[in-house]
Amino acid sequence: MLDVKIPAFANEADEAAWWDSNRDLVSEEFALAAREGRLLRRSDSSTPSAEVPGLCLSDDELLKVHDAARRRRITFLEYVRLAVHEALDREPAA
């Protein structure tokens, strides 16, 4: 486990600046947690489970998706949605 200390923030702007400037450290901690099996799966109760397909991805694949999404500055789900749409666009019409 890396020594990542998240400070108390005076306001949202300070918090956003801290997360932005420590992006690489947080990403490294996330990767380490994945390798060590410390990641927890959480569900968003606002989204009905019937509308969310399950994806089976390895830890390495999940890390690649998270890293790619971070580089594009979009969420994990936005990146997955884009990847699926791009793959479908490459498929020949039926």
Image (tube, rainbow, N blue to C red):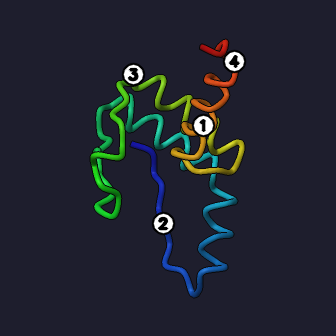
Determine which residue is flagged by label 4: 90
Label drawn at residue 67: 1
Q: Which badge, 4 or 3, is on the more N-terminal residue? A: 3
The span from disc 2 to disc 1 (Cα, nearest Å) is: 21 Å
Say if 30 sits above or below 7 in the image: above
Q: Which mark is residue 6?
A: 2
Q: Residue furthest bottom?
A: 10
Whole-Å distance between the Cαs marked 4 and 3? 24 Å
Quarter holding residue 54: top left
| Comparing labels 4 and 3, the label whose residue is closer to the camera | 4
- How far is mark 1 from mark 4, CA to CA? 23 Å
Give percent across and percent down for residue 17.
Answer: 68, 69
Residue 77 percent across, percent down from the top left: 51, 45
> In x, y percent, where is residue 24?
63, 45
Q: Check disc 4: other Cα within 10 Å, few if <14, some if 14-19, many if 20+.
A: few
| SS label for mark 3 | loop
Amino acid of disc 1: Asp
Q: Sequence order check: which comes first, mark 1 or mark 4?
A: 1
- Cβ atoms under marks 2 and 1 closer than 8 Å: no
Tag in front: 2 or 3: 3
- The Cα–Cα distance between marks 3 and 1, rounded to whole angstroms, is 14 Å
Numbered badge on residue 58: 3
SS for tag 1? helix
Q: Is residue 44 left or right of residue 10?
A: left
